[in-house]
Amino acid sequence: MPTTHTEWFSTWFDSPYYHLLYQDRNYAEAQAFISALLERLQPKPGSRLLDLACGKGRHAIYLSQQGYDVTGIDLSPESIAYASEAEHSHLRFFVHDMRQPLTGEFDFIFNLFTSFGYFKEEAENVVALRNAAAALKPGGKMVIDFLNTERTVRNLVATETKETGGTTFRIQRHLHHDFIVKDIWFQDETGQERHFQEWVRALNRERFEEYFRMAGLRLVEVLGDYHLAPFDEATSPRMIFVLKK
């Protein structure tokens, strides 16, 4: 982890280049995944939903369009400022660190598209899960969508170049201790060389299950992709945990 006290996600997620790099994310796939989840979980109309680490709010907005009362929280002020433009009486956004206690009670909590495992101290992952568990209503459910670490590490692409919006990103990936690290280099609009990193803890299923026990969450099922197929460690692209309080 970088030696500076500034956490990597507090600067990178607020950078316009972060959004530029990932601007081609598949929104149709994301909406289809969320629709499949809702069909499986069957929230009652008007249920209170939390999008934990909501980014610019694309999933929270879609959830609210399905008739639910939705709150989105994220550490990035820039992302929340953007998302807040879509607020209405049943959709709201707040800047919040998941390591701090949550306000309110929710029927369902969603943590989607690998928005977990960023913290330097492993204990902070458990703190975040305990905060989420405390904010779930009795019998409430939480969904954590994470990469399938075993498969990702096995198939890690070490070097990649991506050009988007007139910017060329040079990307390198490697394992460092307990983290999958992505180094990202590019020149900004002034021609200055910039460098950011992403650090995601290489969490396998067993480690997650230990976290869940410590947070008082019961594992209901593990799914392996956005079509909700059963999880297979060798072949599944995702680890999607469905948990119950």
Image (cartoon, rainbow, N blue to C red):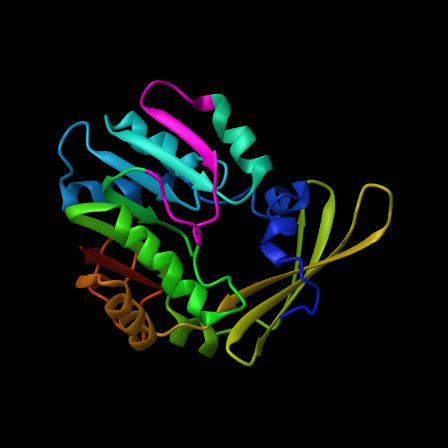
Residue at image position (50%, 22%) is: 85
From the top left corner, tell me how far across and down residue 10 is, in percent: 61, 50
- The answer, for residue 127, to whether it is visible in the render is yes
232 in the magenta segment: no
Q: Hey, which quadrant is residue 148 in on the image?
A: bottom left
Q: Hey, which quadrant is residue 99 in on the image?
A: bottom left
Up the image or down, 16 lies above or below 117; here it is above
From the top left corner, tell me how far across and down residue 15 is, in percent: 66, 44
Left or right position of 219 against 184:
left
Q: Which residues are magenta?
A: 86-103
Looking at this view, is 192 or 77 the one in front? Answer: 77
92 in the magenta segment: yes
Q: Quadrant of the C terminus?
A: bottom left
Residue at image position (39%, 57%) is: 128
From the top left corner, tell me how far across and down residue 40 is, in percent: 15, 46
Left or right position of 42 against 2:
left
